[in-house]
Image (spheres, grey):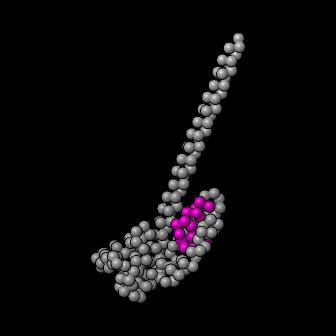
Amino acid sequence: MLSGIFYWAILPFRASLVGTHPVFLAVLNGSTEAIVAGAAFARIGHGSLVVVVLAGIFGLVKFDPLFWWAGRLWGERVIVLMGGRRNRGAKYMGHVHRWGRKFTWPAMIIAPFLPIPSAIIYVVVGWAGMRLITFIILDIIGELLWVIVLIVFFQIRSQRHLLRTASQARAASQASTANQASTANQAREAKDEDGAAAT
């Protein structure tokens, strides 16, 4: 509830902050658009990419220990509650029973990349007895990988867009030069024809 209220409270400010103070927005909510905008600002010399990465990680992990704590306090009840209709939580508890750390440690690292709310994983590993310091370390590693992949992906996409735009501009310039040369040749030929006719 606390994290939900917080994100709803900052929602009206997201649009203005992403265009003016993306690093501050990344600290507040760790959103994709804030991290990408911060990286774009850093690329043109406004800020540091390291600061963007650190801000994004903090923004992404700041409420995660609460979910770990909920798993420690209420265990299966909160897991079932968060698992929803598909009962994902029960499935993950079964994985923990079978594999223990072989499931919980990798699950923490890949949690940001999974197509499910990461909070479910955090509650499960809290219920499984993972220590808080281990949880925080693995959480930071996972979010660091996510932020880096995010920045690299959008940087590559931006670079491709710039190359495509430059290629189109070059082609347009060459076409314009060719048209000008063709027009000049036609004018020259017309002048020569006029001169020959006069002679």
In magenta stretch: residue 9? no
* 75 w.r.t. 173: above or below: below
- Furthest residue in direction left, as rendered: 98
**Magenta highlight range:** 23-41
The residue positioned 54% from the left and 47% from the top of the image is 164
- Furthest residue in direction bottom, as rendered: 73
Q: Is residue 45 left or right of residue 159?
A: right
Q: Is residue 41 left or right of residue 92?
A: right
The residue positioned 62% from the left and 65% from the top of the image is 19
The answer to whether residue 134 shows anywhere in this view is no
Which of 52/37 is in front?
A: 37
Q: Picture coordinates of residue 68 (x, y %)?
A: 44, 81
Query: Where is residue 69, by image quadrant?
Result: bottom left
Overall secondary structure of the magenta section? helix
Which of 121/167 is in front?
A: 167
In magenta stretch: residue 37? yes
* 117 w.r.t. 78: above or below: above
The residue positioned 42% from the left and 67% from the top of the image is 113
* 173 w.r.t. 185: above or below: below
